[in-house]
Amino acid sequence: NINPCVQIIIHLLSVISQNSAGQFFSSGHTNNWAVLVCTSRFWFNYRHVANTLSVYRSVKRLGIPDSHIVLMLADDMACNHRNPKPATVFSHKNMELNVYGDDVEVDYRGYEVTVENFLRVLTGRLPPSTPRSKRLLSDDRSNILIYLTGHGGNGFLKFQDSEEISNVELADAFEQMWQKRRYNELLFIIDTCQGASMYERFYSPNIMALASSQVGEDSLSHQPDLAIGVHLMDRYTFYMLEFLEDIHPASKTNMNDLFKVCPKSQCVSTPGHRTDLFLRDPGSVLITDFFGSVRKVELTMDAINLTDPINPVNGEEQKEVYSYADQLPVSEIIHQKPKQKDWHPPDGFILGLWTLILLVFFKTYGIKHLKHIF
Amino acid sequence: MGLLSDPNRRRALISMLTRLNAPICVVCYFAGVAWFMGLAFEPFTLRTYMSENAMGSTMVEERFPAGERALATGREFAAHKKKVGGMPVDWLVKNMQDRGLEVFTQSFSRTLPFPDENKERYIVKGTNVYGILRAPRAPRTEALVLSAPCSPGDNNNQAVGLLLGLAQYFRNQIYWAKDIIFLVNEHDLIGMQAWLEGYHHTNTTGMSWSPLQGRGGSIQAALSLELSSDVITSLDLVLEGLNGQLPNLDLANLFYAFCQKIGVLCTIQGKLQRNDWDSVSGYNHAVQTMMLMVMKQASGRPWGDHGLFLRYHIEAATIKGVNSFRQYKTDATTIGRLLEGMYRKLNNLLERLHQSYFFYLMPSLSHFVSIGYYMPAFGLLAVILLLRALDLWVQLNTPPSTTEDGVADIDQVRHTPGVLSVLTPLVISHLTGVALYALPIRFQETAVEHFPVSETEAVVLTAIAIYTAGLALPHNTHRYYIVCVCGTEQGWRVLKLVAVLYLAVLLGCTALINFSLGFILALTLVPLAAFVTPHVPKVLSAFILVILSPACTLLFSVFFFQELQDMPVSFQDGWLLYLSVISQGILDHSLYGSLVYPLIALLVYPCWLLFWNILFWK
């Protein structure tokens, strides 16, 4: 014999929880992946490896397992002959923080880090013999974090001192990923000189991009360690690491805070970001949506009725053809008018024009010159 | 019609060339000299900067602690050296082994062609001792060398002590990616030559040495240390090597960077840098520094033990500790830290030093002039020779009678003798050159028998005698002309044309390899090549020709060099110094393969003789 008000409230709550349950199973992403790439080799580029390893460390700490991380390091700094502390890679001077540890799993090492391999990882076009640890096995519900660091310029990123990847190539690779439904949302972070040029050409939806410096600016390195003798980290990633150290799997910090990392006073360069391709408002995107692998868990004491998906019709087997809806028309995003095909005059017209010119020429100078042609 | 194919325009060009030839030559000469002098002016120079990426951005805190212990080791070394009366091989071997190096020795011997009076040696026998510090984790593919000479008397004891102290400190570190070879060489350059020949399996100078038992990898860089006092006031960098070859500028930049970091006073050519480049005395200082470098480079001898490494494409420099009367003294620990820092940076190298310049001049340690800036000075001098050659060619091809129409007088025989007529003076001049090159050493015994001189003096005086005998040639060779030089008026023109072109090619090739030598020879030889004809006043021209000949240039350079070093000499001392310079030049050639003496004897002197021939043309 329950009070009718309470009954209504309980009914409302169950409806709400049903909705939120419905929402729970139909929203966002279900798994997280990370592709972390360091593109430079040689001892004096120690800081790029340290950058990548510190992001790796944060991502692992927040829950993404090694099986979902593709780590590409172009050179082995920990075991370099010049490293006075072998088997370590430090990110803070005075050797406060060793980001190498004993459980680092490098998937692409040394000369395997090439533009071709990177693009193959992104698009999934790998030979059948590639092991699982070297594949990006994402699906249309995956949130992927892509972090690139190295030496770059206006519109390109240098791989291994011998080749480059251009921003157009990268944008096309992301478009391939979109068309193959290999991601739900993508966060692209790049820490190189003139990094903002790399995300200028993106045109696929659901991509958010951050860069450490604008076009025309250099990204600077942070502190040197006087015992090891190299710069340990780049400024942007250093402050980003400090920011991420405060994040734990349950934090509710959102992307707007990440955009504020490393202002010009600390970084000397101006970090940039791009959110126009992203559907959701950055303020509602949690850091752990990309950096961590957070399983949504809600505890409930009540039974929840999930709505029945399809009512089977007797005797008829309904065969529906499913097709992916075009979630977002691309031309609306990039606000471009459809490109006019250039108009060429018809070929016959050009031929006729040349014949006319020749005839006029020979008329003026006399027909006897014609025999010089034929 | 084109500029050169139109006969009217051609004639106008040619007449302009012949009319303005002498003024243009004079202008070019003074422009060349002015350009050269302007190189030392600071706004025309560039600041030095580190070009190699691998060495640029790394910075280490140097931690070498054991300067005093190194000096004590140096004193021990001195005591053992005195006891043995030479190189204390056993003590060195045991000492290096105790410090954890792989130690090997090499014995060598050489009989000099004639006794060396500067260093008082004739039959040289010695031993080199070297210890290899193997890189803890790297494959043995590359090496760095630190060397200190074992000198007689009280010299360089502290250098050997510091070398052993650094060896011990380096042995305790694990960050070496290259093997480090610590070398103590006996009889300075001769020992170094033996070691390098043994290391690279070549034998170019006829020395006999025992093969090396132990080897590192290919040597990337080398430093030679000369330190004779416990405390120093400044460090001097010596770059000039054999045949005027210089190490990569990055090595000098590295040294300068560390001098600034550690705060040690650093000099080049013994001269400290000044900041007042816009004052006259500041400019003078820079010019003096640059001229010292030019003189040292032109002499073609290695000015430190590092000079022989350069031939094998190993960048090397010598660091000398200087103790003069200054207030601020630097101790051995600081020098050790500077060397430690330099070696740590060299350790980071991935390839040989090649990013910076190989051809440069340094008016001070922080400024340099690259080949692109200094070559035009020589180019302007070479242009004079080409203009003269063009002028002679035009004179040879104009017919003697003045017919202005374009019809060629084919029937009028133009008595232009062919090139064969100049063969005689050429051959005779070159034979004299060969005599100057070969005879002094060959006939030293005969000379010693007949004259009361020592062997060295015999060699040098024979050389000077042959040189002077060449002056008598033109009077005697006219009867040997093979081809009848009809129309002798043209004969000397052909000879001069050939001689001028020969000189231009010779000086050009010399300047490419050793700019200083080429420029100094050009300064004196180009004017005489330009103005000499049989018609100038004979006595005055003969005098000028002798003054401008290579031998007198050398004499004046000796006096000038002493002036630049603030140690002017009297005429007697200068003459003795000149004789010793000639003997050193001949010795360098046979001991290390220096090319200056053969160049002067076999090529420059015959060329000068051709001009002498022209002067006395009948």
Image: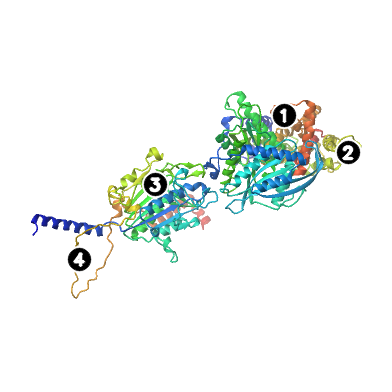
Q: Mark 2 falls on what kind of element?
A: helix
Q: What residue is shown with label 2?
A: B447
The residue pinned by badge 1 equals: B562
Eye-nearest disc, 4 or 1: 4
Q: Chain of mark 1?
A: B
Residue ranking furthest to the top: B280
N-terminal of the two: label 2 or label 1? 2
How far apart are the alpha carbons under marks 3 and 4? Answer: 46 Å
Locate residue A328, reporting x and y percent. 28, 55
Q: Nearer the viewer, residue B497 or A219?
A: A219
Which quadrant of the figure has residue B73?
Answer: top right
Residue A266 % position (x, y): 39, 39
Chain letter, disc 3 residue: A
Closer to the eye: label 4 or 2: 4
Q: Which is in the foreground here, disc 3 or disc 4? A: 3
Q: Quarter of the image holding residue B539? A: top right
For disc 4, the marked residue is A308
The amino acid type found where label 2 is placed reads: Ala
Callouts 2 and 3 in the same chain: no
